[in-house]
Amino acid sequence: MHRRIIFAVAAVMVALMLICGCIGTTTDPTPVEKQQLRIATTTSLYDTKLLDHLTPIFEEKYNAEVLIVSAGTGKAIEYGQRGGDVDVLMVHDRAREDAFIADGYGINRRVFAYNYFVLVGPESDPAAIKGMQPEAAFTAIREKGMADEDVVFVSRGDASGTHSKEKAIWKGAGFNYSTDVQGSGDWYQEAGTGMGATLALTNEKQAYTLSDIGTYLAYKGDLDLVALVDEGDILLNVYCAMEINPREVPRHQHHRREGLGQLPDLR
């Protein structure tokens, strides 16, 4: 496993077992009805294929059907706030996670994995950012992008955890995201898509983007993009799992079917 990916595979299963009262084991030989575990997660985590690996293992061991909706952290949290659509969130934006719990929507937050964000771009590196600290690299991309049409940054632009991290880096570099970055020129383009699709668009434009390292490595074989900036404390990317608060959402509502039509990409 790549040294920059520290996805604790066993820890994911343990976290799900601990936070999901709807899944359990029994010594009673009487057949029990298969239960559903509905997870809303980030595209960056889903695109690493980790959940594809774990789902059949979990389903067989716990007589469960795992249904996954892949969305950005912001959208996943919306599903959790609606109540009844999902049982578990697996996201990566600490500020919004804390707010979700403080507002009574979630409980039992468990950190289960971490990796790092990486700034990727064309090998030619027109903004000359290779090896810089993230904040300095963002500053160089903005300056050269505003002066040179060949330098482009593609943002997720989708209220995801990755988008939140990008905003944090802009803030760390001394820029007001709303006034100094967003809408400041053609150099800055918002994809409004998941991580895999954003990487594909960045590759097409031979631009720069911020990606979690797991998704970048999963797509690397189809890309002409290289990792240019991968050091800096701000690039730490922590994933957690949270249970939807049963006090706010009665348990019997967790498996209702009314919300299914509102959940895209259900797997």
Image (cartoon, rainbow, N blue to C red):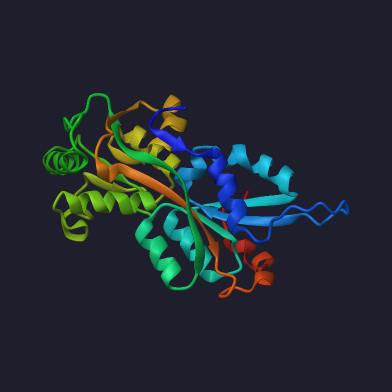
Residue 119, x across and y down, in percent? 29, 37
Q: In the figure, residue 22 lies in which quadrant?
A: bottom right
Closer to the camera in the image, 255 or 61: 61
**Residue 68 seen from this side:** no
Q: Residue at x 62, y 58 (%)?
A: 20
Residue 234, x across and y down, in percent? 26, 45
Horizontal arrangement in the rendering, residue 129 relative to residue 2 (left or right):
left
Horizontal arrangement in the rendering, residue 184 relative to residue 104 (left or right):
left
Q: In the figure, residue 195 lies in which quadrant?
A: top left
Closer to the camera in the image, 133 or 228: 133
Residue 87, x across and y down, in percent? 60, 61
Q: Residue furthest right?
A: 30
Residue 125, x across and y down, in percent? 21, 28
**Residue 254 seen from this side:** yes
Q: Residue at x 20, y 30 (%)?
A: 131
Q: In the figure, residue 5 lies in which quadrant?
A: top left
Rendered position, 145 above or below 265: above
Number of numbered markers: 0
Q: Residue at x 72, y 49 (%)?
A: 62
Q: Residue at x 48, y 44 (%)?
A: 45
Horizontal arrangement in the rendering, residue 169 relative to residue 17 (left or right):
left
